[in-house]
Image (cartoon, helix red, strand yellow):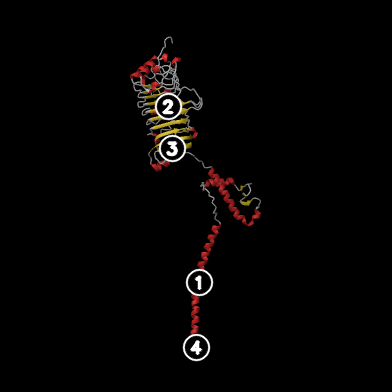
């Protein structure tokens, strides 16, 4: 009985062990699957890392429209060659190194075709990017949201609109003071649409730019309808008319310093200030001829207009210095400057000033600048009126004939100001360089 019981127990034990083995087997298979999956992931990562270029070279991404790339691909075609040592040559989609044939590469054909396609793709992108027009016209407000300074070329309506749109977006649609300098206008022209847009200007300054022409009504835009200050300096304008500045009735301060580059490039101007006449308070007009060493004579009446057409009721300061007027002044030249207080005519090559040239303005005039001219005499009646109305006159650096200007000598002996101290005689010889107000004249027999 014991043996039989012992045998039975042993038999049950073996059966239980086999049962445990069968239950444990699927769990081991499940763990093996996890290990295999992890191994496959690690192997994949290893393959990826082995193909990554960890060199320090950087490449710039160039985004080019797809149509441009397709066009460039058609132009490049299927043949791009190079004779430089060590370069890659692609022929009909095959890629070989210098000195090797396609057949010698054998199994590497697919890989080299991919490289060849990549080379062509880079060429396509670079070529297409080179054809995209680049403008160097840029603007900066130095974080003020007030004064915008622009430089570069070409200056056109698109470039201005694009640059100003940025400031409108970040600063709001306020009134800006704009300076455009050291620039080249497209076709040397401000066209009819140059300043059309959604921006608004308080001040516009254009200086040291290549600018020869302004289209009629170019400033008659909503952007300019409240413009207060307009300046052109170092430009080369050739023609100005009543239509040039139409729409600028709010301008108070106007400056034009124009450079004549050649003897033939004269400024033809006719009453161009008329659209701004109502509110103008300051005008500076200079036609500089030093660059071309020209002797063109201009008439300020052409610039200011006839008194019957234009009256400057608010214009207090007028500077016409540096322009060759010579003998063109007459009794109607300044008659429409009904409110002028300062009139500057320095370095205008004036040789003669006729009678009554300043009579119409002497009652409002406070300062008259006649320095640096070729004047020899001055009207006695005007000097008497100037004394009566307390007008200060700058007269230095002229060619005064003291024995022929007794009225001038008397005037200078009566006034006490810095300008009188600098006025000296040119003749007679014995008084040359002597201050007129201290000169002891002995002009008998002269």
Q: Which of marks 3 and 4 is in front?
A: 3
Q: Quickly name the residue at label 4.
A: 4
Give the CA distance from mark 1 to mark 2: 100 Å
- The residue carrying mark 1 is 28
SS at mark 3 in the image: strand
Helix, strand or loop under label 2: strand
Decide if residue 171 is in sight here. yes
Q: How far apart are marks 4 and 1 (CA)?
A: 37 Å
Work out how far the residue at label 4 is from the one at label 2, CA to CA, in angstroms.
Answer: 136 Å
Q: Nearer the viewer, residue 377 or 62?
A: 377
Q: Which mark's residue is nearer the viewer, 1 or 2?
A: 2
Disc marking residue 285 = 2
Q: How far apart are marks 2 and 3 (CA)?
A: 23 Å
Please, is residue 172 above or below residue 313 in the view? below
Pointer 3 residue:
149
Q: Which of 308 and 97 is in front in this view?
A: 97
Q: Is mark 1 on a helix, strand or loop?
A: helix
**For marks 4 and 2 on the same chain, the one whose residue lies earlier in the sequence:** 4
């Amino acid at each position: 009985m014991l043996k039989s019981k012992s045998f039975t127990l042993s038999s049950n034990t073996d059966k239980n062990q086999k049962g445990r083995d069968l239950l444990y087997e699927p769990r081991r298979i499940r763990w093996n699957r996890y290990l295999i999956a992890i191994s496959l992931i690690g192997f994949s990562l290893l393959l990826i890392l082995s193909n990554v270029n960890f060199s320090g070279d950087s490449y710039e991404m160039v985004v080019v429209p797809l149509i441009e790339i397709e066009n460039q691909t058609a132009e490049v075609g299927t043949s791009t060659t190079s004779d430089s040592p060590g370069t890659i040559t692609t022929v009909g989609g095959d890629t070989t190194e210098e000195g090797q044939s396609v057949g010698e590469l054998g199994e590497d054909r697919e890989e080299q075709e991919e490289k060849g396609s990549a080379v062509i793709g880079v060429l396509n992108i670079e070529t297409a990017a080179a054809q995209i027009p680049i403008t160097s016209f840029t603007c900066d407000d130095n974080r003020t949201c007030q004064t915008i300074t622009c430089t570069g070329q070409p200056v056109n309506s698109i470039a201005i609109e694009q640059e100003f749109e940025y400031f409108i977006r970040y600063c709001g649609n306020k009134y800006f003071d704009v300076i455009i300098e050291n620039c080249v206008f497209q076709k040397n022209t401000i066209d009819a649409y140059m300043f059309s847009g959604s921006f608004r200007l308080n001040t516009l300054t254009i200086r040291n730019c290549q600018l020869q022409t302004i289209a009629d009504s170019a400033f008659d835009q909503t952007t300019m309808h409240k413009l207060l200050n307009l300046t052109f300096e170092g430009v080369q304008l050739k023609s100005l008319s009543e239509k040039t500045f139409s729409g600028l009735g709010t301008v108070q301060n106007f400056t034009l310093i124009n450079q004549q580059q050649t003897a033939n490039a004269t400024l033809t101007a006719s009453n161009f200030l008329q659209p701004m006449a109502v509110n103008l308070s300051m005008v500076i007009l200079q036609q500089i001829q030093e660059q071309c060493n020209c002797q063109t004579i201009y008439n300020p009446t052409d610039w200011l207009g006839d008194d019957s057409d234009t009256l400057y009721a608010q214009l207090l300061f007028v500077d016409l210095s540096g322009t060759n007027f010579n003998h063109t002044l007459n009794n109607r030249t300044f008659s429409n400057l009904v409110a002028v207080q300062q009139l500057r005519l320095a370095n205008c090559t004036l040789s003669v000033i006729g009678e009554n040239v300043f009579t119409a303005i002497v009652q409002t005039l406070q300062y008259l600048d006649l320095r640096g001219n070729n004047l020899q005499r001055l009207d006695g009646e005007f000097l008497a009126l100037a004394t009566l109305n307390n007008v200060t006159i700058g007269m230095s650096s002229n060619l005064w004939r003291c024995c022929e200007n007794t009225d001038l000598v008397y005037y200078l002996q009566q006034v006490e100001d810095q300008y009188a101290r600098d006025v000296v005689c040119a003749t007679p010889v014995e008084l040359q360089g002597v201050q007129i107000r201290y000169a002891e004249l002995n002009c008998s027999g002269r």
